[in-house]
Amino acid sequence: MNHSQKDALSKLMKYCAYQERCFAEVEMKLASLGLYDDEAGEVIIELSRSGFLDEERFARAFVRGKFRFKKWGRRKIANELRQKKISEHCMERGFGEIDEADYENTLRELAETYWAKLRGEKNVWVKRKKTGSYLLQKGYEPELINMLLKELAEV
């Protein structure tokens, strides 16, 4: 490794230690430091070898964080992970971090809260459409949303 690679490795160790990073983020950081192709590849290999960079660990942390704190659904999380070039295998492992009961409870809580906000709206179909759009935007599956909206409309 040349001097600039050693400097970049040192900076990227700190960068990766601060929070989980994916390969795409590290590649962008390396490019901003002026390293490309083989030089960047050597730094990435060293980061992986020394445990600073792990795609599966990143996927697990990303899924956990976006679900727990932003209350995103699987579809939105999956789209974000695809943009970060995370493999399907790692995405599946990441989704293992979501407990199915928690997922359904979170969806229900979001739906009920949004539905309650629309209490001034008398037309049930308008309430269903607005609540459904909100939940789709959060990344939840249409099948789950439709079942829940039917329940809410009956109450």
Image (cartoon, rainbow, N blue to C red):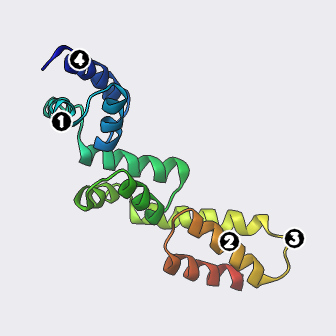
Quote the CA–CA distance across marks 2 and 3: 14 Å
Residue 80 image point, x, y percent:
43, 55
Q: Earlier in the sequence, mark 1 or mark 3?
A: 1
Nearer the camera: disc 4 or disc 2: 4
Quote the CA–CA distance across marks 3 and 4: 62 Å
Q: Amino acid at mark 1?
A: Gly
Residue with the mark numbered 2: 131
Q: Is residue 141 above or below residue 9?
A: below
Q: Is residue 136 above or below residue 66?
A: below
Residue with the mark numbered 3: 120
Q: Earlier in the sequence, mark 2 or mark 3?
A: 3
Residue 150 image point, x, y percent:
63, 84
Residue with the mark numbered 1: 41
Q: Amino acid at mark 2?
A: Thr
Which residue occupies 57% across, 81% down?
Answer: 146
Q: Which mark is residue 4?
A: 4
Nearer the camera: disc 1 or disc 3: 1
Q: Amino acid at mark 3?
A: Gly
